[in-house]
Image (cartoon, helix red, strand yellow):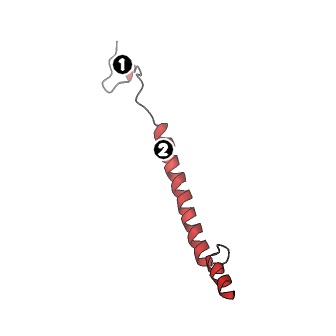
Amino acid sequence: MSQEIIDHEKKDFTKSWVNSSRFLFYLQVFCILSFVLGGCFRMYNQRYKGTPAVEVQSSSKFKPEYK
């Protein structure tokens, strides 16, 4: 009877420090990775999509053209 209790205590999340710390480490890695990938995906969706057609004055070009 006592042997069964010891076996269950080894498998219990709250009793085994090694299993719980391993689980919490992988949970933390998964959360950080999901936040980073989610941020990259959101930045990719809201990226700058081209240059607008802006009219530049002829006097402010590299070789200015004056009237």
* Residue 35 appears left or right of 65: right
The relative height of residue 18 versus residue 42 in the rendered view (above or below) is: below
Question: Outermost residue, front direction?
Answer: 1
Q: In front: mark 2 or mark 1?
A: 2
Q: Quadrant of the N terminus?
A: bottom right
Q: Secondary structure at mark 2?
A: helix
> Farthest residue toward the top?
67
Q: Which residue shows up at 57% across the image and 63% down it?
A: 27
Left or right placement of residue 39 versus residue 58 in this view: right
Q: Position of residue 56 (x, y in %)?
A: 39, 21
Is 31 placed above or below 1 here?
Answer: above
Q: Position of residue 37 (x, y in %)?
A: 49, 50
Residue pointed to by mark 2: 41
Q: Nearer the viewer, residue 8 or 47?
A: 8
Instruction: Pinpoint residue 57: horizontal percent, then vertical percent.
Output: 40, 19
- Categorize mark 1 by other alpha carbons within 10 Å: few (<14), some (14-19), many (20+): few
Examine the image and state in which quarter residue 52 appears.
Answer: top left
Task: Identify the residue at image location x=48%, y=44%.
Answer: 41
The residue closer to the viewer here, 37 or 16, is 16
Asked if the residues shown at circle 2 and circle 1 are in contact, with their CB atoms under 8 angstroms apart, the answer is no
Residue at point 32%, 27% (across, down)? 62
Which quadrant of the rendered structure holds the C terminus? top left
State the SS at label 1.
Answer: helix
Q: Amino acid at mark 2?
A: Phe
